[in-house]
Amino acid sequence: MDAPYNIEGNVVQDIIITLKIDKLAGLGDGVGSHDGAKVFVPYTIAGDVIRARIKKETADATYASIESIITPGQGRIEPVCFHFGKCGGCSLQHLEHRLYKEFKQQMASEAVRKASYDTNMVASMITLPAATRRRAELKVKGGKIGYFSERSHQLVDILECKVLEPELFALVMQLKDKIRKLPTFPNINISTIKINGVDDGYDVVMEGEDSFKLELRDLPLIKRFSIRKSADLQTVFQTSDVTIKLGDAIIEIPPGAFLQASREAQAIMTDLVTSAVKDASKVLDLFAGIGTYSFPLSKNAEVTAMEGDAGMVAAMQKSGKIKTEERDLFYNPLPTEKLNEYDAVAINPPRAGAKAQCEQLASSDIAKIVMVSCNPATFTRDARILKEGGYNLTKLTPIDQFVYSSHLEMVAEFSK
């Protein structure tokens, strides 16, 4: 059996303790103290008294799971999904709404504080309803189709999902039915299903040989079905152009392109980014992706979009509305002298952040930087680099794009 926690340390079996949870840690786990060591337990809240099963011990902490709840903490509620606690997709359904908002608001404030900025610059979090995720990555293993459990490779076979768009979840169930009707099921060679919500439907990419055996043309929600085998990607069928509208541009997207997880959150973040640099006439968009912000920005400014993925760069180039450059900004960040050619920069790095590029930005003369970050930890590191370069944080807006999870999207405005 897979070890339950992906943390270096000793796996411990059959040790059960009584534990009171004192607070929530940064990633949403409850924290208590036992024999002088911190004990981290998912799906708990402050005030819970539980029987906890020890799973792993390291030099710094102990990691456990709930065996039973003796006394629930104030603000604990029933989760909305019966997979909660097994499926690792959600971690905060057990918090009543006030505690949930406070926890995520505090995440944003802590990220700002640790970067040595004034936490008064943090705006109130913009909340989103559940069932707004347009993107899903499902795993297939041993006849099960769903998500891995918390810190594990044990797969939970999902029968419901409260975070996906209703049409997306309906498509997932249709795909499950198709896969389970394969003659070799459950011994099938399909490992991953990636689905992106596009305009008027969904883009589906599967990995695994047996994907070729599926007949999916009768599923009207699928606009394109592609199969990835090693480094090769083959489109099996496409019913029409697979596009998304960004600003005034209609962009044909390549299979598996990165899109923001929620259509609603994307609209909110686009408004924040364009508002932050509204007075700039020449804007640089770094880690531009498919041009999520580049095309809306191009309504009022000359925009150059830089992105490391060749397929997404090619998709942006077809529009003819913006300048583009394929560039790996992790290993080849744009240098300060080139940055200084622009009035403003928008930067939307992946979870790893943009340390090397922020080091160049910090020494630039750019008047305005707007950063979109999905990871408070790497945001703190990168924002501190900007501060050391003389940038002030003028506003940070948290957006609850990843409902019920401990992830948080943030849009931060810096000036010099």
Image: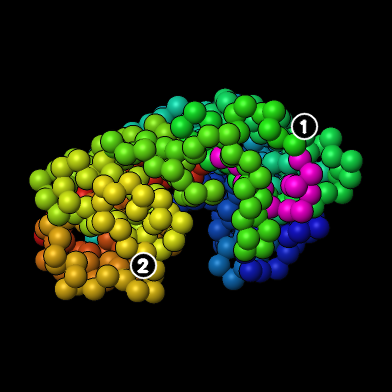
Residues at marks 2 and 1 touching, judged by CB atoms closer than 8 Å = no
Q: Is residue 276 left or right of residue 176?
A: left
Q: Is residue 346 visible?
A: no
Task: Give the vertical position of 354 relative to 314 (above or below).
Answer: below
Identify the amino acid type marked 1: Asp
281 vs 168: above or below: below
Identify which residue, 399 or 145, lies in the foreground.
145
**Magenta stretch contains residue 357:** no
Classify mark 1: helix, strand or loop.
Answer: helix
Measured as percent of width and height from the top left, residue 320 is found at 29, 49
Determine crowd level at label 2: few under 14, some 14-19, many 20+ residues with C-alpha closer than 10 A: some
Q: Could you say where residue 35 lies in the image, as x and y percent from the top left? A: 61, 60
Q: Which residues are magenta?
A: 203-214
First of labels 2, 1 by sequence position: 1
The circle on residue 327 is 2
Q: CA distance from mark 2 to mark 1?
A: 41 Å
> SS at mark 2?
loop
Residue at point 42%, 34% (across, down) = 263
